[in-house]
Image (spheres, rainbow, N blue to C red):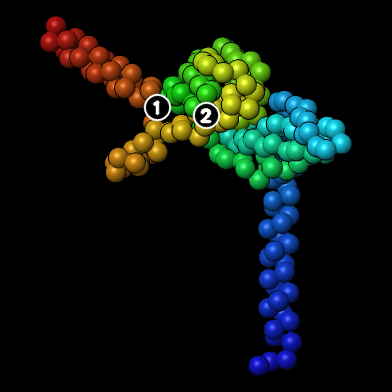
Amino acid sequence: MVPGKKDCVFKKGIGRLKNSESLVMEKEEQLNDRLIAVNRVAKVVKGGRRFGFNALVAVGDAAGSVGLGMGKANDVSEAIRKAIENAKRNCVHVSIIDGTIPHPVIGRFGAGKVVLRPAGQGTGVIAGGPVRAVLELAGVHNILTKCIGTTNAHNVAKATLQGLIDLRSYNEFRRLRGLPVAQVHSEEAPKEQEQEQMSTTAEEHKKEG
């Protein structure tokens, strides 16, 4: 074995590890966080009560990546810090098309149920509280929502995230059904074909006349 070769290989591996860590750091810097709820909890012990805090935080890059996390600590700031770290580790990618969702969906978690429906341009995010926080951080700009059942912030936020995870794009549906994936899918294509057919029929009538 060539002297120093093992050291070279080890150094190359460390270099790749550092590059991957830098990419992860850059990705985490692009994430925005939003505090959804802070609760104070009490544990009864022999000498009295011991108070603590738990925080629910959502993070996202407004481009399809979003995550939820919860942290517990004796201090509010420490609980929020833990929640942010947990949310960054649990980030998922969701399907968003033209600032809205591709199809209606119902997200469920525990006793929470959230109905999500796509909306046209200019509608805005018709939602409140935890649902709005998750949707805006995911990058949704136009949507209609309705919360059914519990209004607990944890269940509502997790139900919203579950609904976004259940979304599938047009090409994903075709892939699941074993059909060839369409390169371009646009609603304007059938309209253009109809216009071309109408123009050709009009020209034929003129020639016959």
Residue 192: x and y, percent? 34, 21
For the C terminus, the image quarter is: top left
The furthest residue to the front: 46
Q: Which picture quadrant has residue 175? A: top left
Instruction: Name the residue beneath numbered marker 2.
Output: 109
Residue at the spot x=64%, y=15% of the render?
128
Callout 2–callout 1 Cβ contact below 8 Å = no
Residue 128 appears in view = yes
Q: Which picture quadrant has residue 22? A: bottom right
Residue type marked 2:
Phe
Q: Secondary structure at mark 1?
A: loop
Q: Callout 1: few (<14), some (14-19), or many (20+) C-alpha neighbours within 10 Å?
A: few
Residue nearer the viewer, 136 or 79: 79
Residue type marked 1:
Ser
Residue at the spot x=24%, y=18% of the render?
197
Instruction: Name the residue beneath numbered marker 1.
Output: 186
Q: Secondary structure at mark 2?
A: strand
The furthest residue to the right: 47
Residue 96 appears in view = no
Residue 119: x and y, percent? 50, 16
Residue 193: x and y, percent? 29, 22
Q: Callout 2: few (<14), some (14-19), or many (20+) C-alpha neighbours within 10 Å?
A: some
Residue at the spot x=71%, y=56% of the render?
21
Alpha carbon distance from label 2 to label 1: 34 Å
